[in-house]
Amino acid sequence: MSDLRDEQQDRRRLRRGPVIAVLSVAVLVLLTLSGVLGAQLLFSDDEEPPAGGATTSSAPPSSQPVIRDDLKVTVGEGGSAASEHDPSVPVGYEPTCKGAVEAATNYLVGLNELRPSGGELTQEDYLALVKDRTTGEYQSEAIESAQAFFERVGDTEGPVPVIHPEWGGFTVAECSEGESATINIVSASDYTGTGEFYYVATSTQLAWADDDWKVSGIGDAEAPTTLPEEPVTAPDDEVSTLVGTHTQWENYEDAS
């Protein structure tokens, strides 16, 4: 818990919105047919973002959030079935970038070692869930980490962790549909049961395995704006707006 707070306090202002260099050149052109002199301004940043992947537009953030139609994601939705180890975790995602965002978001909430201490499921079911929802070398790392944690805490009861991805937003850092994806998410978490939430940015790497998106790695991510250092008890509207108006980040859809 203290590590989480220290980590968030160490985060610096990280605005990755591209800076546009605009060269304005007056060109004197002699039109031989009409004898008319004209001036023309030349700009170079008018390319369309690539289809099907994360946007790479160099345009500055707009004043209102604009969510791509193919990336409208609601926390808790997605998938075609519920995990046999934990019905609260959806499985069976589409092999699309949107499916990858849905999977990363639901795994961020569902794959939390504190959940058994909060009584949401048994340690055995959690380990089975981790084994089923991870892949590659990361699978053994995640299982060993969870086992070591359970050995330390034993049967100690604790608060149910609460995570709100919808208080922040997400970006598709990389995505090859049906192969791999990296999804970065800004969320707010309360692991103490006090109702105080800390903002943090995380990165989830996914791989398409056994006809589903599964976690192949996790880590820290750079937030597109400054995150509050102090805990909050409600969504920070400034964070939500700045995340949603960034050219490469999206807000989550309203669940209601």
Image (cartoon, rainbow, N blue to C red):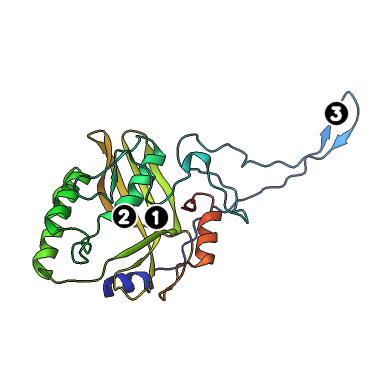
Discs 2, 1 touching: Cβ within 8 Å: yes
Query: For the residue marked with disc 2, what is the amino acid?
Result: Leu
User: Picture quarter containing residue 80?
Assistant: top left
**Above or below 136: residue 229:** below
| Quadrant placement of the N terminus | bottom left
Q: Please give left or right for residue 23 compared with residue 53 in the image.
A: right
Q: Which mark is residue 185?
A: 1
Label 2: state its secondary structure: helix
The local crowd at label 1, few if under 14, some if 14 to 19, many if 20 or more residues have their Cα within 10 Å, is many
Above or below, 128 against 112 in this view is above
Residue tagged 2:
108
Which numbered disc, 2 or 1, marks the residue closer to the eye? Answer: 2
Whole-number angstrom distance, CA of label 3 to CA of label 2: 62 Å
Q: Nearer the viewer, mark 3 or mark 1?
A: 1
**Where in the figure is residue 33, as x and y percent of width and height?**
89, 23
**Residue hosting label 3:** 31
Amino acid type, callout 3: Leu
Q: Residue at x 61, y 55 (%)?
A: 64
Q: What amino acid type is highlighted by mark number 1?
A: Ile
Residue 84 at what x, y percent from top left? 20, 44
